[in-house]
Amino acid sequence: MASSTEKYTYAYPRPAVTVDCVIFGFDKNQLKVLLTKRAIQPFLGKWAFPGGFIQEEETAEDCALRKLREEAGLQNIFLEQLYTFSDLARDPRGRVISIAYYALVKPEAYMLEAGVDIEAVRWFGIDENKDLAFDHMQILHTAIERLKGKIRYQPIGFELLPEQFTLPDLHNLYETVLQRSIDRGNFRKKILSMGLLIDHSDKQKDRRARAAKIYSFDRVKYKELTESGFYFEI
Amino acid sequence: MASSTEKYTYAYPRPAVTVDCVIFGFDKNQLKVLLTKRAIQPFLGKWAFPGGFIQEEETAEDCALRKLREEAGLQNIFLEQLYTFSDLARDPRGRVISIAYYALVKPEAYMLEAGVDIEAVRWFGIDENKDLAFDHMQILHTAIERLKGKIRYQPIGFELLPEQFTLPDLHNLYETVLQRSIDRGNFRKKILSMGLLIDHSDKQKDRRARAAKIYSFDRVKYKELTESGFYFEI
DNA sequence: ACAAAAGTGTTTACCCTACACCCATGC
DNA sequence: GCATGGGTGTAGGGTAAACACTTTTGT
């Protein structure tokens, strides 16, 4: 037996371990997912989530952050572990376990996709027909279910909207993600009653009809409330 | 590049991958966790979750099921993936990633722990002071949080009670897991109003005071309701 | 009889729902 | 003016919280 400081070579066969990132965006009342076109085998030319093999000196989360930066030019965005996929046949090359993450990006974050190959990276509508590599269709499905479940009782919807947004924006987002209609009036009352939105009605821009008030999400207030037992819920 | 059928040896260093199982039980109004005493280095003699290296021909879930069987003599119990831990220093032997699962067992399931070394396997109260191997204290904490969160909106509490139980039993379980008092009357009204309990009041056993009615959880009914949009919630 | 625990009922306040309506703006 | 979309008000139904009360059983 190796000492507890000395490196130890296991007798066990080791699976390869990758990290994959499901990246969600919201644009034109559509939920989107960011995919990259594979430049190598297997599944060359097919679309897949940004991801790759985990390095020796990085945690899974570090790896996800690195992949977001390298492959999608994204930084400082919401990131959370999704699920670990370990089906034996999920990679034709052999045994590969994937630790999947999901990320939520605001429009302003992906506007500055500088240096990212425009041919190889694209946003797809969530319902758009696409032929994904590996078991990425299954991973996507898991991610959507997580998002649908979590958006109702955690304030993660704001991560998909610009820093400043209107209540109709937020309302649209919820209707789109949850795929059901939500009463306008009741929705705004519920949200506003939480006291978690900061009013920015001074800066208004033109709109087709009456201009909607602009708000931002009060993270500080949310943290305070959470610590005193408050539960966000739509 | 390897063909898609041929085995491929990655240039990347591979971390070792283990599976660990947090096993919860409920006994004498206490939430318990099952631990095994380590018989090998590192952390020899310390308590840890049942777990071990994932084999080449098994999924993570299969590995968890195998470990539950081999190390704790448990079968046919609730099992769900918890989280994957990948901190660099979580194992003194080197890079080891752990896919953690949590399991819920009914009293009748762990009564028949035949063939399991009584010295090496023990139930610990959740608040009992214990010195756990690796980062298992952190894993335990994550598992408890998951249980606390999930018991409120998924009928997993029943997995910790005998097949037949009383409403006071269930009430006790919820108070214990959520660590707050819940009004008796309101609790029973809420539970009963769901119509998910089957009454077995014919078989009564003696108690210190008035005997409580015996119920069991109606899984079939729950599945039906779920499919028509019902959401369990306490 | 009394204590302990099971089970029931009642009141109140709040919240959620389903609407209807008003307001501001562009065409 | 009218269509469009933002924003507000309200009546009523339901349900959750708080608490008192009744019932059953062991000692």
Image (tube, coloured by chain):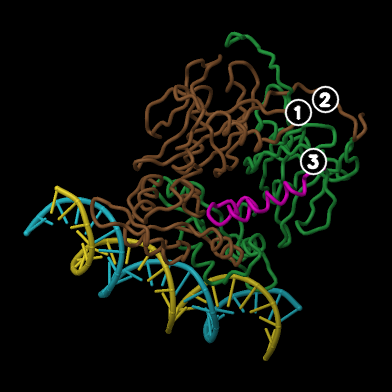
Chain colours: A brown, B green, C yellow, D cyan
Does B169 lie within the magenta span?
A: no
Q: Residue at x 76, y 21 (%)?
A: A13
Label 1 secondary element: strand
Image position, residue A107 (x, y; %): 44, 42
Q: Which mark is residue B114?
A: 3
Circles 1, 3 touching at the beta carbon (< 8 Å) = no
**Disc 1 crowd, CA 10 A, few/some/many (<14, 14-19, 20+):** many
Image position, residue B130 (x, y; %): 84, 53
Circles 2, 3 touching at the beta carbon (< 8 Å) = no
Q: Are marks 1 and 3 on the same chain?
A: yes
For mark 2, name the chain: A
Residue span colored magenta: B134-160
Mark nearer the viewer, 1 or 3: 1
Q: Are marks 2 and 3 on the same chain?
A: no
The reply, left or right, for residue B92 in relation to residue B109 is right
**Disc 3 crowd, CA 10 A, few/some/many (<14, 14-19, 20+):** few
The residue singled out by tag 2 in the image is: A10
| Cα–Cα gap, marks 2 and 3 | 31 Å
The reply, left or right, for residue B166 in relation to residue B48 is left
Label 3 secondary element: loop
Q: Nearer the viewer, residue B12 or A175?
A: B12
Image quadrant of residue A11?
top right
The residue singled out by tag 1 in the image is: B16
